[in-house]
Amino acid sequence: EVQLVESGGGLVQPGGSLRLACTASAFTFRSYWMNWVRQAPGEGLEWVANIKEDSSERNYADSVKGRFTISRDNAKNSLFLQMNSLRVDDTAVYFCARGGRPHAFDFWGQGTMVAVSS
Amino acid sequence: QSALTQPPSVSGSPGQSVTISCTGTSSDVGGYNRVSWYQQPPGTAPKLMIHEVSNRPSGVPDRFSGSKSGNTASLTIAGLQAEDEADYYCASYTRINTFYVFGTGTKVIVL
């Protein structure tokens, strides 16, 4: 069974940094685009970033461009999101999601909570 | 890039059909057959229900169907069941700034 498990969330002050990780299992990780999607408390979903199978292409939402960096380690079946210059409005549950269907997210992790507050 | 527009809520009795609309522009919904739909019960992760406008992944009941006309996509749930009560989100590829855009979300209420 495909599994995605996020980690690394927590409470951080505005301007701080955090690195999220997502560990994948039960599928060939290196063969799929991977995504980060977030959901602020009580709000809808917002796509954050994605990365191609071989890391040759990365895309970001305007709201995080220049502050967040997506990366992956195919040898360790892991996806990462380095978040710098965090703002209060970055507070959300962050999900990793597999791009297993053309332009769709077919499996999701349970999410990790990031709270940005002073 | 603004979120795609969905109604805040739709409701129906068990056995009835409900349809959720998702309105975008020619730069996203109307320009590509790259619309997907997700079901999210409270406190859980989203689940893919429809991809590429009208394709159902294996395991998704055939009560769920998708379509598109112009800049508006739709998700129809036929034979509504209590377990269908959840938030539903559409999403589309977009050529404007960001890569994907989600809808505002619709709460399906089973009366």
Image (tube, coloured by chain):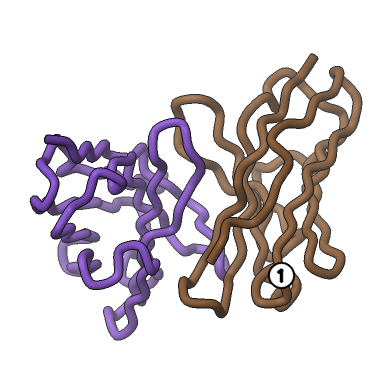
Q: Which residue shows up at 37% across the image and 60% down it?
A: A48
Q: Secondary structure at mark 1?
A: loop
- Tell me residue A86's x, y (percent): 18, 52
Kindly indicate which chain is depicted in brown in the rendered structure: B
Quarter of the figure with residue A109: top left
Kindly indicate which chain is depicted in purple in the rendered structure: A
Name the residue tied to disc 1: B25
**B76 with respect to B24 (left or right):** right
Near-viewer residue (B77 or B98): B98
How many discs mark residues in the rendered view? 1
Query: Badge 1 sits on which subunit?
Result: B
- Tell me residue B17's x, y (percent): 89, 32
Quarter of the figure with residue A36: bottom left
Q: Which residue shows up at 63% across the image and 28% down it?
A: B86
Q: Report the residue that reaches farthest toward the top.
A: B111
- Tell me residue B18's x, y (percent): 85, 35
Q: Report the residue that reaches farthest toward the bottom.
A: A56
Which class describes the residues within 10 Å of circle 1: few (<14), some (14-19), or many (20+)?
few
- Tell me residue B109's x, y (percent): 73, 22
Identify the amino acid type marked 1: Thr
Q: Which residue shows up at 56% across the image and 55% down it?
A: B102
Q: Report the residue that reaches farthest toward the right.
A: B16
Q: Which residue shows up at 55% across the image and 35% down it?
A: B40
Quarter of the figure with residue B23: bottom right
**A93 with respect to B24 (left or right):** left
